[in-house]
Image (tube, rainbow, N blue to C red):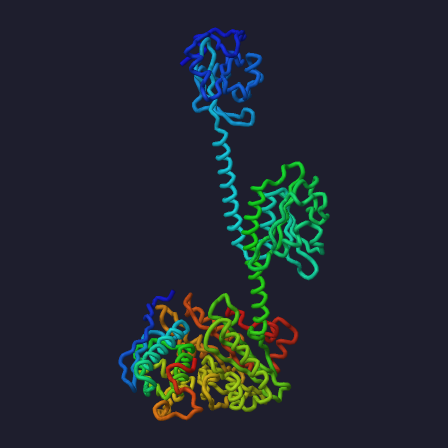
Amino acid sequence: MGYAQRVPLFVTPSPGAPDSPRGGGVSVSAAWSDAPYPVLVVDGDGDVVDANEAARPLFPLAADAGGLPAEDLPLWLADAHRRLRTSGTPEPGAVSGTVAGRTFEAHPSPGEDGDVVWWLVENTDLRLAEDALRTERERTELLARVSGVLLSSLNVDRCTEVTARMAADHLADAAVIVAPAQGRRHPLTYAQVGGTVTQELTQIDPSSVPGLAEALQGFPPVPTRWIDPECLPGWVIPPGFRGPIGSVIVTPLPGHGAPAGVLILLRSSTHRAFTDGEEVFARLFAARAGAALSAAHLYAEQVSITATLLQELLPPRLERVHGVEYAGAYRASQDHERVGGDFYDVHPGTDPSKETFAVLGDVAGKGLEAAVLTGKIRSVLHALLPLSGDHQQVLTLLNEALLTSHHTRYASLVMASVRRRSGLVRLRLTSAGHLPPLIVRGDGRVEAAGTTGQIVGALPRVAARSAEVVLAPGETCLLYTDGITDARGGPLGDQLYGEDRLRRVLGECARMPAEAVVERVQMLAAQWLGGGRHDDMATLAITNPAGGRGALHIVSGPDDATGTGRGRRPGGGGR
Amino acid sequence: MTACQPVQFSLVTRASSDHTMELAIRGDLDYDTGDEFLTAVNGALDTHAERYGPSLRHLHVDCAELTAIDSIGLSALLALRRRTHPAGVTLHFHRRPVHFVRMLEVTGTADHLVERADDTVGTAAPPEDRTGTAPASGQR
């Protein structure tokens, strides 16, 4: 298909009238002059020598001057024409470009005398539709990304930061997030395109920005055209933002019930103003960000409530009291929980001649619900301390305090009244429906304390039999919950740890410090479990120190690190 | 997680007449199944009461296939006793596995659970002040 080869390259200005196509080929003229598409005849030098009716509104010069110089042809068409002339073959695929704000595809066909007839097919609407589709796709993808990024964090600051950055990067030149007031001040988060995100706590006047006060209460956004950028107070402009503000959008971040804050989008005056479509999109963006922020706020609130409650429910620190070692360890049934249905407490006697009251117990159930009941029991027992000389009376009063009409959640516990006198530790032990404490003798024998009794909180009356136990130096009394003996695991995965294994382990713990005993018991039970499910596990060791009071005093005197465990968290090994 | 395959918990009504009902527990009665047990046993008691009126006197529970029981399980049994005892129904636990016996011993609840109920409740004209005259409904 050579066009160029057949014709000499010379210029023939069109002398003819526009309506009489050059060359006089009636059939050719008829073929395109009435065509519904714009048609241009371009000669070898790129000058338009003729155009049909449909082309004239687009190329005005073609009509009156009878031609259009090459330099007035749209660049994309002139280029295509030149390439066609040099290569002699039409390019694969149509060339396209804009003419008078509309877009066309141009298809060449050979004309006479080496001219090329360009058929222009308009595709403006298609192009607009494609552009709109692409924009929508980008927005949808952005929204999906916003949700993805925001849902991956429940941290309020992090969510706010991400929201501000994404808003600045994708919606505007800069973004400000005004969070609900904390006291008199509002947390503000600033972000700019490509810049860092800064957060500060400032006292602002919400009424200084049109629509802000309303948006903070969750009312619909103010249309962007109502906001005069000139009137914006200084705090709205992010620090370091250059250039005057051209347009502003203020839109609430809707939350669950209460607004999570307000998003202010700023565009500098060198950029175009926000369109209606962008405003709608900003609202969609704000809806997603608001939901995420609100969830983060709720979560933060719950965490702080839980933390407050937990402070009261956590196992206490134990330490040496009046020459007797106490050590406790606790492992909640869920490894991520710190509280559960087991508890222990040690209430030191006011002076060495007074008994120290220790208790370890287990509430039916797991988790926070159980923990709340342990809190109640611990409070009641604390209040009953003056009566702790009489374990039966304490049990009776505790039982009455716990009996409720609506459930039969009960507790089992062991009480120990401890006093050290002339090197021996005397214990009065009372089990209330709990596993009897195990006594580790100096020679490795392990015996169960002979105390039995009934659980508290479920029966109308409780009875218990106490046992007196004396610990020589190096001997330990271990109080433990059934989470230890009922630990299911072992080589086959389904065996109970059982009391026999516990006794064997304890036999090796003679003359060990209290802390070492609980750590060893907890560690071996945890190993037995492997990764299996388990109940709460608590242990409390009461030990008559092997070295005697004097010896240990010398050791702990000069070197604080070898002290008696004072200040160390109990149960560190169990978590 | 563990290698063992636990028996699916179930409560089966073996037989019932106007004065007695026999149930069988199968599987673990524990933290996960305690509520299920209470719902099932309350349902059985309600059904019995609808059919025979407040005439039930003995509830026999076969524990041969009770594979494990924990504190919530015992709590559920105590809740059952709290409903049946005032209604004049005495509980009986048969073929108790060792672990169940041990649990009742340690907690000191064996006698309480099977304490003989006053079987005149509901039949003769009951005293006005006594609770549990309607054994099927109250106590919830």
Q: How many numbered marks, from 0 up?
A: 0
Residue A133 vs residue A153, the one in the foreground: A133
Residue A57, given in percent of the width and then of the height, sits at: 54, 21
Image vertical order of residue A256 relative to residue A26, above or below: below
Whether residue A113 is visible here, answered yes or no, is yes
- Residue at image location 54% in from the left, 8% down from the top: A13
Residue A259 vs residue A432, the one in the foreground: A259
Residue A251, given in percent of the width and then of the height, sits at: 61, 50
- Left or right of B120? Residue A36 is right
- Left or right of B16? Residue A52 is right
Using the rendered view, name the quadrant where residue A503 is placed.
bottom left
Image vertical order of residue A5 relative to residue A373, above or below: above
Residue A132 vs residue A348, the one in the foreground: A132
Using the rendered view, name the quadrant where residue A375 is placed.
bottom right
Whether residue A11 is visible here, answered yes or no, is no
Residue A205, given in percent of the width and then of the height, sits at: 71, 54
Quarter of the rendering occupied by the N terminus of chain A: top left
- Left or right of A92? Residue A70 is right
Image vertical order of residue B98 relative to residue A527, above or below: below
- Residue at image location 52% in from the left, 43% down from the top: A139
Residue A371, given in percent of the width and then of the height, sits at: 52, 74
Image vertical order of residue A299 relative to residue A238, above or below: below
